[in-house]
Amino acid sequence: MLLSLSVRDVVLIDRLELDFKPGLTALTGETGAGKSILLDALGLAIGARADSALVRRGAELASVSAEFALPDDHPARVAIADQGLAAEGNIILRRQIGTDGRSRAFINDEPVSVGGLRRVGDLLVEIEGQFEQHRLLDAASHRPLLDAFGGAAADALAVAAAWRAWRESQNTHREAVAAATAAARERDDLRHALDEIVALDPRPGEEAALADQRVLLRHREAMLEGLDAALGDLEGERGALAGLAAAQRRLGRLAEKAAGHTDEALAALDRAGADTAEAVARLRRLAAELDADPRRLNQIEERLYALRELARKHGTTADELAALHERLAARLATIEGAGGRLAALAAAEKEARASYLAAAERLSRRRAEAGKRLDLAVNRELPPLKLEKARFRTSLERLGEEQWGEHGLDRIAFEASTNPGAPPAPIARVASGGELARFLLALKVALAEADPVPTLIFDEADSSVGGATATAVGERLVLLGKSVQVLAVTHSPQVAAQARHHWRIEKGRGKGGSVLTRAAALDNEGRREEIARMLSGATVTDEARAAASRLLGTSAP
């Protein structure tokens, strides 16, 4: 609730301090005394549009601050914390305006944007008047108010959570489908690449071996000529094999005479003969390979080109082609196994949609029940407020699936008709200024426990009515004051008499004879005089004082 309001240099106010208490507080005074200025000042503190014309003449800066006491769980604390500010203890909103029209906003003495101040202020104060922009006329406020009235806030949170889960599941499935579509194209490319690698059948080290063979075959003629010569040196009549054999025979004949001294030499000659024979065999095989297929060089060069071209195509080396085959095969297996995941994601999306629908249907039923109870409560308040021909209706319209959202399946609007047989329409379209204020009062009374705004200001809700109707307005303001703090700017003595607290706004003279707006908290005698003035006008008579006493005596302040 609003604890205090401090105003400096706003229009006709030079310095004003007002303290407020729970329940209904009346703000009265003659026309032009400055009651609207006071409301304008409060509006500045809660983020209303600034105008340099509000700065008092002769001053350089207008300043307004409002202090509020709130429950720990009030939504305004969340709105403050969302701006990175401390939200503990009492909340102080402050606004400054210079003569150049520039303004500064503060929450708990920390600078904030005007928009940030307004977001918090809208949760703390609501001004209802004939010419105000009423929050209750904004259809966006009807849904949360109906949910709070029907005790369906938890259901609404469950629907929002189910909606987010459905949307997340839907997005995951869509992304997987898109990935699968792209993967299908990749799958064809993978299969083609694998077929190429399998057909070529590359082996690690093959490129180097083929390159060596190509070098050898490119010198085939010279190699064959040299091999023939080498074999002649080894196998001819005077070749190495013949010489080794002759030496072995000579030493063998000397073996008995040498007494074993030639044994090692004979063993060496034996080994040399075997190695020479092996060398001859190898040279013959090499010669046979060189002479076997003259086309072998072309085959090797074609194979080597194919290996290197395939490696270049895949950005790797010929020796890595075999490993690439393994990786591509694993990727293809993963893609071909994704079909099962898509089916699981589709099933999860379907289940999430069903969960959202079930939660949203429950919420819709709660809303329909709450709408009926709200209609009864509001319509019960209308006849005493001289709106006996009017009817209030909570409209619930089922939305198409494309319009479903985190708030459920319904479009909710508060509607009214002021004449029998007239179709219901938004309240602002069918109610005149005075009717509108009383209509909103009836709605506020019905929604008192549901609306989180702790301070309500009614600016002449009793306009154009008197007698029993004005008394009924006062009674409902008193009733409303049991749930929230109510400030009523009024010209009705019947309303003022029912208030628990009373401020009189009046004009006075400042230094130099300037006209200034003042405010005075009234005691019982002051209240009697003020209500008598409201009854009789400029000249307060004894009859007016007696009537005021009767009003105060029969009221329940």
Image (cartoon, helix red, strand yellow):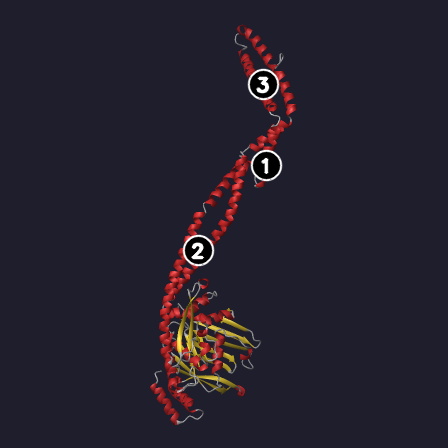
Q: Residues within 10 Å of mark 1 (few under 14, many from 20)?
A: some
Q: Can residue 397 be spotted in the picture?
A: yes
> Which marked residue is nearer to the observer: mark 3 or mark 1?
1
Q: Is residue 264 above or below residue 66?
A: above
Q: Is residue 279 above or below residue 458?
A: above
Label number found at residue 169: 2
User: Can you say which quadrant of the picture contains the C terminus?
Assistant: bottom left
Is 216 left or right of 81, judged from the image as shown? right
Q: Residues within 10 Å of mark 3 (few under 14, many from 20)?
A: some
SS assignment at label 3: helix
SS assignment at label 1: helix
Residue at (41, 54) in percent of width and height: 348
Q: Residue furthest front?
A: 421
Which residue was labeled with disc 3? 280
> How far is mark 2 from mark 1, CA to CA?
47 Å
- Amino acid on which disc 3 is placed: Val
- Amino acid on which disc 1 is placed: Arg
Which residue was labeled with disc 1? 308
Pointer 2 or 3: first along the chain: 2
Q: Residue furthest top?
A: 257
Q: Position of residue 500 (x, y in %)?
A: 37, 81
- Amino acid on which disc 2 is placed: Ser
Pointer 2 or 1: first along the chain: 2
Residue at (60, 15) in percent of width and height: 235
Q: Position of residue 355 (x, y in %)?
A: 39, 58
Label number found at residue 347: none
